[in-house]
Image: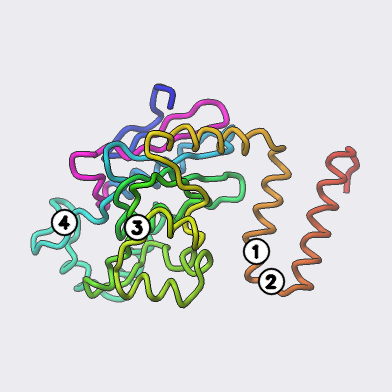
Amino acid sequence: MASLEPLLDQDGVRLTVDDALGTVTLTNPAKRNAQSPALWRALTEAGRALPGSVRVVVLRAEGKSFSAGLDRQMFTPEGIEGEPSLIDLARQDDAELDMTIAAYQEAFTWWRRNDLVSIAAVQGHAVGAGFQLALACDLRVVADDVQFAMLETSLGLVPDLTGTHPLVSLVGYARALEICATGRFVQAAEAERIGLANLAVPGDQLDAAVKDLASALVAAPRDAVIETKALLRGAQSRGYDEQRAAERAAQARRLRDLAGVGE
């Protein structure tokens, strides 16, 4: 990736922009890009800081691991200084706890905006919150050493950082349940076979493969990509006839736009 002046560089997150391509990099390899509320706030801010020119966002991570999940200090009684511990969270009332988790989820939500296509470049461990961050993106390109795992259930918790919906959408209910309930690792070949990964490549080819994919996405007409993404995202919640109608409406907008004819 090109070395560009960052628009944001804080709390283990760096955002750079090169015309239509934005790159969000996790920058704490010494801790295997472990996640914390501060990192989630920085990820949320990265989404807000993206210029309107950006069409494709690549999420990548420095070091051998994409993200090993939650910072282990969050599981200690004292937690992370300045942040609520898990015990503190448990003591919040229902409304406050819901608001706290919803704020954390914002870091995982903006990647699926219709005006963007997001690509996660994943190497090494993508565990728990790391797995869910990769799932937050539209597409995943993985290195051949990747290891996905959803360990929340093994810890007595549930995946709550928006990962359950895309996981079920990608691999189906039964396989998603098995992956989450057992906490087992899913490696590159299986990830590609079951639809978790769009492409698996040798580790030294990961950046090049992501660059090629991003270039192909940017080459397509932006408005057509936006309309297509919206159609595909809505397909699961629509019936067959509703989807047919949505296709007709979207195509009418595209034809009129291309012809310069007002509605």
Q: Is residue 127 left or right of residue 217?
A: left
Specify which label sits upstream in the sequence, 4 or 1: 4
Q: How is the image coloured?
A: rainbow
From mark 1 to mark 2, how far is it between C-alphas? 6 Å
Cα distance between the residues tagged 2 and 4: 41 Å
Callout 1 touching callout 2 (CB < 8 Å): yes
Write the residue at 85% across / 39% down. Answer: 258
- Secondary-structure class at tag 4: helix
Q: Would you say 83 lies left or right of 61 here?
A: left
Magenta segment includes 29: yes
Crowding near the residue tagged with mark 3, few <14, some 14–19, many ≥20 C-alpha atoms within 10 Å: many
Q: Which of these two is toward me, 216 or 110?
A: 216
How packed mark 4 is, by other alpha carbons closer than 10 Å (few <14, some 14-19, many 20 or more), is: some
Give the structural element (helix, strand or loop) at label 2.
Answer: loop
Q: CA distance from mark 4 to mark 3?
A: 18 Å
Q: Residues within 10 Å of mark 2 (few under 14, many from 20)?
A: some
Q: Nearer the viewer, mark 3 or mark 2?
A: 3
| Residue at 44% from the left image edge and 73% from the top image edge | 175
Marks 4, 3: nearer the viewer: 3
The amino acid at mark 2 is Arg
* Secondary structure found at label 1: helix
Which residue was labeled with disc 3?
Answer: 148
Tag 4 or tag 2, which sits nearer the N-term?
Answer: 4
Tell me the residue that label 4 is attached to: 72
> What's the residue type where badge 4 is placed?
Arg
Q: Give the x, y percent position of residue 169.
A: 53, 67
Residue 105 in which image quadrant: bottom left
Image position of 122 with respect to 10: above or below: below
Q: CA distance from mark 1 to mark 3?
A: 27 Å
